[in-house]
């Protein structure tokens, strides 16, 4: 399989090609509006809407940014992430009470819940407006953006099932919710959620268990860049051991290097190639 040169809007179900293109869409969320609009048009998405709101969490991050691009066959909403140092307090803090989960299912990390709450109504209205011809809908995001993509998918599925997304693909996503919500999400959405973790990436290891957990459907990239459908136990142990040797949030650490979006893209390209 070779690296595709155009965004495939037609295939269904899980595919590595889709994972690659949704990773490209997640990476594009970090760009400015003009760049997003130009690239979306080049990919065949004729309509772009930007979503940006401000909120006041108890942490040093004050806005949520995302964009939605709509084509004839597919609509993608990509949530912007942030640098790990900016959400370090969110990821390590276990004292702030969590927020109730969507549809009354379990609990959600308070900071992530507030970040999504600030933008979700606009995103949902945009999807309802643009999904005029049965287009498939996907959420994607990297880092914080991955947490928001997963929670947006959970909220839409549990609260507005007629609008439920066709899939959620995240990259370097932190833990976002408790086990009750993760299980409720998996029961009805388990075949449509895919969570990519690059080797020693520190962000998916936080916030701490057992309060917060991950949804299932892991796709693990090992130290050689090979993609697996699970994380072998020996790899997990090695990852944790490496994390003890230095500050995992230090710029030069393996935990931060593996978190960079360009390293996720490089690994997906390697597996396609």
Image: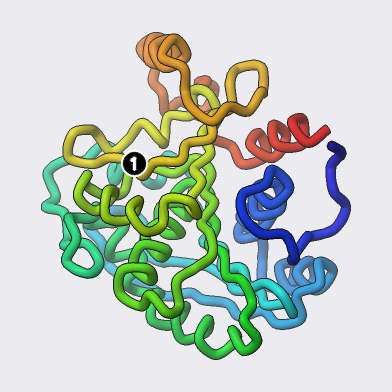
The residue tagged 1 is: 214
Q: Where in the figure is residue 234, as x and y percent of width and height?
A: 44, 9
Residue 189 percent coordinates (x, y) = 41, 57
161 left or right of 40? left
> How many callouts does the rendering have?
1
- Determine the residue positioned at 81% across, 66% down: 43
Q: Residue at x 63, y 28 (%)?
A: 227
Residue 195 in view, yes or no? yes
Residue 179 drawn above or below residue 228: below
Name the foreground residue: 12 vs 41. Answer: 12
Residue at point 58%, 27% (across, down):
228
Q: How is the image coloured?
A: rainbow
Along the line of sight, which residue is nearer the eye, 251 or 16? 16
- Quadrant in which the C terminus is drawn: top right
* Nearer to us in this view, 142 or 106: 106
Indicate left or right for 69 with 166 as reference.
right
Helix, strand or loop status at disc 1: loop
Q: Is residue 136 above or below residue 96?
A: below
Residue 226 quadrant: top right
Q: From the viewer's perspective, is 17 left or right of 216? A: right
The residue drawn where x is 27% and y is 48% is 183
The x and y percentages for residue 265 are: 69, 40
């Amino acid at each position: 399989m070779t690296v595709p040169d155009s965004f495939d809007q037609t295939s269904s179900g899980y595919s590595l090609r889709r994972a690659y293109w949704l990773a490209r869409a997640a990476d594009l969320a970090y760009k400015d509006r003009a760049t997003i609009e130009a690239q979306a048009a080049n990919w065949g998405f004729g309509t772009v809407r930007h979503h940006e709101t401000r909120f006041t969490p108890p942490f040093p991050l004050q806005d949520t940014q995302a964009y939605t691009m709509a084509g004839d066959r597919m609509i993608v909403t990509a949530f912007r992430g942030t640098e790990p140092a900016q959400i370090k307090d969110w990821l390590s803090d276990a004292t702030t009470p969590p927020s109730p989960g969507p549809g009354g299912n379990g609990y959600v990390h308070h900071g992530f819940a507030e970040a999504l709450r600030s933008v979700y109504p606009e995103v949902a209205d945009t999807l309802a407006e643009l999904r005029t011809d049965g287009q498939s809908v996907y959420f994607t995001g990297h880092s914080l953006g991955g947490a928001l993509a997963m929670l947006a998918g959970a909220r839409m599925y549990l609260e507005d099932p007629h609008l439920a997304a066709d899939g959620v693909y995240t990259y370097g996503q932190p833990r976002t919710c408790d086990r009750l919500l993760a299980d409720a999400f998996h029961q009805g959405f388990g075949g449509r959620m895919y969570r990519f973790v690059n080797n020693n990436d520190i962000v998916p290891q936080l916030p701490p268990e057992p309060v917060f957990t991950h949804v299932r459907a892991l796709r693990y990239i090992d130290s050689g860049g090979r993609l697996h459908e699970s994380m072998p136990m020996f790899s997990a142990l090695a990852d944790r051991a490496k994390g003890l040797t230095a500050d995992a949030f230090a710029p030069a650490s393996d935990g931060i290097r593996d978190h960079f979006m360009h390293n996720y893209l490089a690994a997906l390209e390697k597996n396609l190639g």
